[in-house]
Image (cartoon, helix red, strand yellow):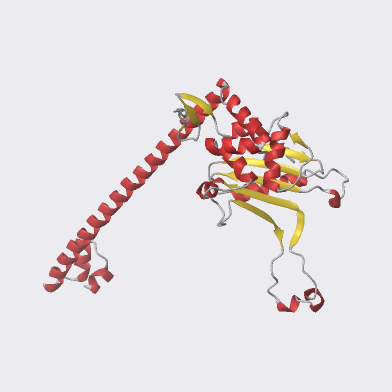
Amino acid sequence: MVERPNKITYEKDEEGATWQEGRIIRIPAIKDFMFKNLFGVNGKEENLKGLLQAILKIKIESLEIQNPELPRDYKESKLGVLDVRAKLQDGTIASIEMQVKDESNINERLTFYVCKLYINTIETGGKYENMPKTIAIAITDFSYFNRKEYHQIAHLIFEECRDENELVEEILKREEDIQVTDKIEIHIIDLKKFRKKKEPKGELADWLNLILGNEEEIAMASKKNKTIAKVDEENKKLSKKKELQAMYDLSRQMYELDQKSKEARIAKEIEERVEECVKERIEAKVKKYKETIAKELLKIGIKIEDIEKTTKLTKEEIKKL
């Protein structure tokens, strides 16, 4: 009888890294520093091309990885720094931002980035009609928009006109335009919703499993996708580097401090609420005691003004008694 080898066992820590026999073997690409090293530096064009093709559902012949820093228009304007920015062979500009922490502003951030990118595609004296398509992609580890899909796509679209006087019969006879322009496009990849999906299929799902460091799914995807297999090996190789492990340790420490800070804030809020409830109960009992005294004083004919001074109740409160 042939004995089967033991199945390889992995351990995951709270930040998503994979450990084996006490050694870290994968820092997940959900960490922005790992994501940039895998997809955002020169020499990683094929990696980025594979990921973008899965997200955008288009064939990309070639692309150029660009400086992720968005230039300021003037000294005081806000500087934007993306995780990844690329120019596709047809001139399309695509950006990706990895956003793990929900700062309740992903809609404004995406609007800022896509507008900043789009504006910077036109040169002095250039024509508006020659401006290339601009795509902003956010990979988030939280659910911000109330949408059922984990891959959400948005454009500038027309809304239905509510003023019936504006309707024109000739327009109604032909198909109406839906989009204002196809040159601005936003994609949101919601990893929180993706995790809840039962055995998601498709090329994008394979890439997202790689980003999250899901070992079994990565092994299966690597057998059918050479680019994913290549990125998998690069991910594990980079994870052995001391400088990246140091960055990961720092992120874990920051996570632990953040958790402790949250716990401390919650404990303080509970304490304050308890104190507030105790104070409210004491004040209610004191007021009830004052009202009892005021009633007795009213019975023996003491003037309202004198009762007011004694009990500190208002005239209106005493009159109600």
Q: Report the residue that reaches farthest toward the top.
A: 242
Tell me the residue at 62%/36% (across/down): 223
> In the visual, does 173 lie left or right of 305?
right
Q: Residue 67: give x, y in percent of width and height.
A: 73, 34
- In this orientation, which residue lies closer to the viewer: 106 or 274? 106
Work out whether residue 75 can be spotted: no
Q: Is residue 251 above or below residue 319?
A: above
Closer to us: 265 or 311:
265
225 over 104 or under it: above or below: above
Vertically, is 282 above or below 25? below
Residue depicted at 50% across the width and 27% down the height: 249
Please state the horizontal and vertical placement of residue 9, each as a whole percent of the image: 46, 31
Which image quarter is the C terminus in? bottom left
The answer to whether residue 217 is visible is: yes
Quadrant location of residue 239?
top right
Check the image and name the residue furthest to the front. Answer: 1
The quadrant of the image that shows the N terminus is top left
Is 118 left, or right, of 81 in this rendering? right
